Amino acid sequence: MARKQKSLFYTFFSLGTACTMIYLLGIHAFRKSLLYFRTIY
């Protein structure tokens, strides 16, 4: 039972890490695009 709970925890942890990475990358890309558009206009 404890083993299953541990694997479930690891699954949630990896999912959370992946979501955080994507979120941070998205913010970075958004800021870059904002700067890019600011230089055009």
Image (tube, rainbow, N blue to C red):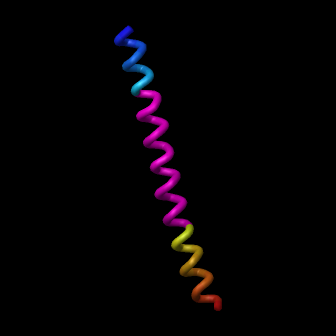
Q: Horizontally, is 10 left or right of 22 in the view?
A: left
Q: Residue 3 location, x and y as percent?
A: 37, 12
Q: Which residues are magenta?
A: 10-29
In the displayed orientation, state which residue is furthest to the bottom: 41
Instruction: Work out whether 7 lies above or below 35.
Output: above
Quadrant position of residue 1 = top left
Q: Eyeballing the image, is 28 above or below 1?
A: below
Q: Position of residue 39 (x, y in %)?
A: 58, 88
User: Which quadrant of the figure has residue 8?
Assistant: top left
Say which quadrant the C terminus sits in. bottom right
Q: Residue at x 50, y 46 (%)?
A: 19
Q: Is residue 21 left or right of residue 40?
A: left
Residue shown at 39%/17% (left/top)? 5
Q: Quadrant of residue 16?
A: top left
User: Is residue 9 shown above or below 31?
Assistant: above
Image coords of residue 4 (percent x, y) = 42, 13
**The stretch drawn in magenta includes residue 1:** no
